């Protein structure tokens, strides 16, 4: 399992159980977020394994990057059902996926661009397109990640 892009973990497909020691260790570090690669080769089953792990380590924020890739519907459902999971909105396949994620889990979605592979300006424009000006947009474009990194109450809202 190799860290990617400055800390994103990318276990081999079908082996997401390898993340358990990382999540266990993160419990000792005051809610240190763990970011996991969400696009291919990550599978639907991998996301389900990650969700099961997040249920065991509820104090650890688990961020699914790239909106779960081609498995974005599964990712949104799992994040909605598991309060310690979050979605990074980069690399969305369709704008509808962004809209749905923001509508279903507004306090656990966050801006991402997947730079240098993605374009931050276009990614921001997509988020702006699916949110109106105001609190929700501000939360998605920076508030959620700021609270998450600070370990503040907004980051823990809804977590058990």
Image: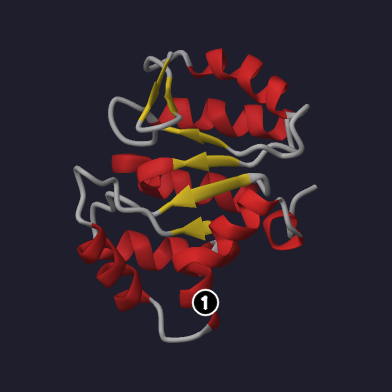
Horizontal and vertical percent position of residue 141:
44, 67
Q: Residue at x 61, y 39 (%)?
A: 33
Horizontal and vertical percent position of residue 1:
43, 13
Q: Nearer the viewer, residue 126 or 13?
A: 126
Q: Nearer the viewer, residue 151 or 83?
A: 151
Q: Residue at x 30, y 53 (%)?
A: 113
Residue assigned mark 1: 136
For residue 56, above or below residue 78: above
Q: In this view, does 62 lie to the left or right of 40?
A: right
Q: Which residue is drawn at 46% across and 44% down?
A: 75
Q: Which residue is drawn at 69% across and 28% down?
A: 26
SS at badge 1: helix
Horizontal and vertical percent position of residue 160:
80, 47
Dot 1, how many residues are within 10 Å of its Cα: few (below 14), some (14-19), or many (20+)?
some
Q: Describe the colour scheme in one phrase.
A: secondary structure
Q: Is residue 145 left or right of residue 5?
A: right
Horizontal and vertical percent position of residue 117:
19, 43
Q: How many marks?
A: 1
């Amino acid at each position: 399992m190799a860290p990617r892009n400055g800390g994103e973990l990318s276990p081999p497909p079908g082996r997401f159980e390898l993340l358990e020691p990382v999540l266990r260790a993160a419990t000792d570090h005051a809610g240190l977020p763990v970011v996991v690669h969400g696009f291919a080769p990550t599978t639907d089953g991998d996301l389900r394994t990650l969700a099961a792990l997040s249920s065991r380590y509820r104090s650890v924020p688990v961020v699914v990057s790239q909106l779960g890739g081609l498995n974005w519907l599964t990712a949104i459902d799992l994040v909605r059902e598991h309060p310690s999971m979050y979605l990074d909105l980069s690399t969305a396949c369709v704008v509808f996926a962004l809209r749905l994620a923001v509508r279903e889990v507004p306090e656990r979605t966050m801006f991402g661009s997947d730079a240098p592979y993605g374009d931050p300006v276009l990614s921001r424009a997509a988020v702006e397109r699916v949110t109106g000006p105001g609190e929700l947009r501000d939360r998605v474009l920076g508030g959620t990640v700021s609270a998450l990194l600070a370990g503040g109450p907004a980051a823990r809202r809804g977590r058990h």
